[in-house]
Amino acid sequence: MKLHTKTNTVTKSENFTESNYSIDATAKAFAILSDSLYSNKIKAVIRELSTNAYDAHVAAGNPEEPFYINLPTSLDHQFWVRDYGIGLSKEDCMSLYTTYFRSDKTDSNDAVGCLGLGSKSPFAYTDQFMVESFYNGNHMTFSAYKNENDEPVFALLSEQETEEANGLKVSFSTEASDRIEFSHEAHKVLEYFMVIPDSNVELEIDGDTDGDATMSGKGWKISNKLSYGDNVLIMGQIAYPLDEDQFEGEAYTMLDTCFGLVIYGDIGNVDITPSREALSYNSRTKEFLHNKLIEIIKEITEQSQTYIDECETKWQARITYIDLLSSLRRVRPVAEAIESVKTWREEKLFDSDMGSDITLPESTKAGDNVVKYSKSKWRSAVHREEISELTVFSSKNMSIIYENEKKGSVGKIKHLLKEEMTEGNVFLVRGDEVYLQEILDCLGAKREDLTDVSTLTSPPRKQRSSVYYGSGTKRCEVFKCVDGEWSVSSANVSVKEQNVYFLESVRDDYYVNGEAMPLYHLKSILKALSSIGADTSAIDGKLYVFTPSTIKSMKLRDRSNWTDGGMVLTTELRYQLDKRRDEVKAYEHSDKNGWGVGNYELSPQTLKNIYEECETHGKLGEYMGRANPELGCGVLPLIDASSKVKIYGAFKETIESPEIDIDSMYDTMIESYPMLRVAGRWIQEEEDIKMVADYIDSINRSRGGM
């Protein structure tokens, strides 16, 4: 990459005694340029060696050929990168590897490198690495290492003939505990490479395509792959984070409200920091990015209008407009750009400049011709509404159904909302063909834009009870647990049923201990009890839901065979809190709340799996023996459930300080096995568990412990 330098014009009033600055080649200087330069050392080495390999292929005229990257595994701790470029002669190797800031890429924007620092980047991780050059039938092996003065040295070890293809191989040994981090960082670095390298492990990288784009244009896209808050510039296949605080006005707002924005720049468009971990926000870089951001906002406006005008019907244009706005509403300049689009082929999209409502034909009778059915994912009930205006929603959350047959139409729509859409809005259009045409004209739709009710799936037939209960039988809802998940289904129950429980419900609210809550809250309480081992078999399939008037008319509170289910749940939660008092103590007095019991490197379950795989005990055994090995697995859902029914506050006041300082014990254990802090939450597979257990066993045995 060409470096941008400037020439200054200096005017002097007289001749002064001058001395140019120079750099003293000391161990301290080399350490700064090879080690302190990089904040993420593993990522830096992978990035620098991989881009060098790509540059080598560009120089050799084979940019489409993948280079090779060997990632460390549990059996092989070597990391190396092998390219198939032109290789380096002995003189070039000795020159480039021993001279900082010397590069053969500073005169071309075809190459990513330019600073002459990347080839020395392995020193950021290790004190010694190997360089092998395959050059025109000659195989040269060099060792780069730090001498007794901590200064880098480059030495030729061997030279022999070879038939291997030209190229360069850089390799070094890694720490066993860094294996997972190498894999993780390699995936992040290589994500935007145009050619994914070959590797000894499977690289789960799709490559940089527009398949993840919500919207894209010339040199940019809005991706759904990036983490929340991330916006990047891709230059030379490297992703540089964009800092919104470097900008003002629309450019700032664009970055501040957007996440997933990917801007593509040609090599040399902007300047970078020496570490290549960030952009250098000089005036040149900021001008390029500011202009690009304003250009993107303008392009989104034009693109949105084009998308809408290309729609075949006005209805499709309306849906396209809402879909665009729904997917990008969070980005304020983008939302404003889309909202500025008001027409489809010079026709007004909606009746009002505000909102997305369509006034229905005058012949529409409220509650008769068009009915809106809606359902929230948080509620089990379907809401019915009589309308004279139709609000256009995202295509994912809306259907328009024509009632071409009346029998079972409402049941089919409710089944559609509950089982297939899970949430959304369905508009049922009734009437003859004449009225249907009026609706189509009003919406700007074609007949095929509407779905016939006859094509919908019918709800399953309700099973009749084989037991006849007489006039005391009621139709209601019942809670059942299947594979640890609680669900609600319809049921018939008699007042004479034995050992059953009732819950009070008003509309979509359920009452426990006098507290009204939505269905998903109640399900979370039931699931919490199941997950901590509480015996819920008594209420499984016998917890029925009734309205207050039904409970009163059936006199359930006066019957010995019926029990208040809300009272039973509250009593069980209090019992479980008291039973797990020590766990709750540890949670409340821990300063690491947030992961498992707290913000630990390892979840309780993972730690338990490692412990069971170990042959020795040591500090891990002490921790697992005194601290509850199940700590955190059930206490958090229990606390959350108890808080929902307003009983946790009173219980919390009875908690005293724990006798065992869980945090200190955990910290001591981690300090004994440093690999755990590094590997952390990446320990998941059985192979990883076994590797960590072997590591702990080796530490314990080296200390003479069992």
Image: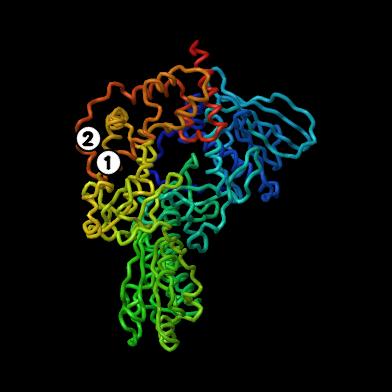
Mark 1 and mark 2: Cα distance apart in space: 9 Å
* Tag 1: amino acid: Ser
- Residue 128 on image: x %, y %: 59, 25
Furthest-top residue in view? 704
Q: Which mark is residue 651?
A: 2
The answer to whether marks 1 and 2 mark residues whose Cβ atoms lie closer than 8 Å is: yes
SS assignment at label 2: helix
The residue located at (56%, 27%) in the rendering is: 691
Classed neighbour count for the residue bearing mark 1: other residues with Cα under 10 Å, few (<14), some (14–19), many (≥20): many
Furthest-bottom residue in view? 434
The residue located at (30%, 48%) in the rendering is: 501
User: Is residue 250 visible to the viewer in this orientation of the structure?
Assistant: no
- Residue 361 on image: x %, y %: 35, 85
Q: Quadrant of residue 421?
A: bottom left
The residue closer to the viewer here, 653 or 670, is: 653
* Tag 2: amino acid: Phe
Q: Which mark is residue 642?
A: 1
- Residue 703 on image: x %, y %: 49, 12
- In the shown orientation, is residue 91 left or right of residue 309? right
- In the shown orientation, is residue 198 left or right of residue 485? right
SS assignment at label 1: helix
